[in-house]
Amino acid sequence: MAAGIPHFNLDRLAANSMASHRLIQHVGKRYGLNVSEKLYDRLNVYFFVDGHSLNDRPRLAKVAAEVLSDTKDNQPMTEDEILTFLNGNEGRTEIENALRALHQIGVHGIPKFIIEGTTVVDGAASSDTFVNIFREIEQRGSIKRDAVFADILGVNAETVQEGSHTRESMLG
């Protein structure tokens, strides 16, 4: 409930999530991380609350088209264009490489947080763990800006620098 998920649909079927991961990566590269985060948030509700499969490509295309229709882009991808993308293989290699990299740094399940590209923290860690990490960064006076997965996923430096959860995007 605290994470904004009022009800987990326990009857949902587990499915291969490659299509949804490829889609989020593609949207991030094309529209920016703010838009891909909106899609990711919507897909969390789609799967965890609504109980839909993450490899139901026509349904994924419909949801993504709805999210993209709210972008500032004058010509967002249509549902048909998204479905064509999902039925292809673009982005698969990048996602497979990201999965290997996650495995190498010790991420075998979710939720996990990767702070500064190197520090892996379990999602169930106490708040003290996070406070200590952020206090260390604060004392150091700088943040390591290592976007570990940017190269792996093919996200350009400008998109990474723009970020996703900017003050502006969160306020309006």
Image (cartoon, rainbow, N blue to C red):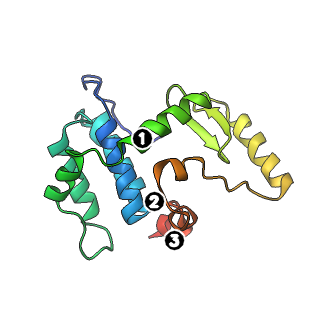
Based on the displayed image, in which of its 4 quarters is residue 55 positioned?
Answer: top left
Q: Is residue 1 visible?
A: no
Name the amino acid, label 1: Ile
Name the amino acid, label 2: Leu
Q: Residue drawn 59% across and 29% down? A: 104
Which residue is denoted by mark 3 in the rendering? 168
**Quadrant (top left, top right, bottom left, bottom right) of the N terminus:** top left
Which residue is denoted by mark 2 in the rendering? 33
Asked if labels 3 and 2 touch by Cβ distance under 8 angstroms, the answer is: no
Based on the displayed image, in which of its 4 quarters is residue 32 positioned?
Answer: bottom left
Residue nearest the observer in this picture, 2 or 83: 83
- What is the secondary structure assignment of the residue under circle 3? helix
Vertical relation: 82 (above or below) 130: below
Which residue is denoted by mark 1 in the rendering? 95
Q: Is residue 121 left or right of residue 5?
A: right
**Quadrant (top left, top right, bottom left, bottom right) of the C terminus:** bottom left
Distance in Å between CA atoms under marks 1 and 2: 16 Å
Q: Which is nearer the N-term, disc 2 or disc 3?
A: 2
Q: Nearer the viewer, mark 1 or mark 2?
A: 1
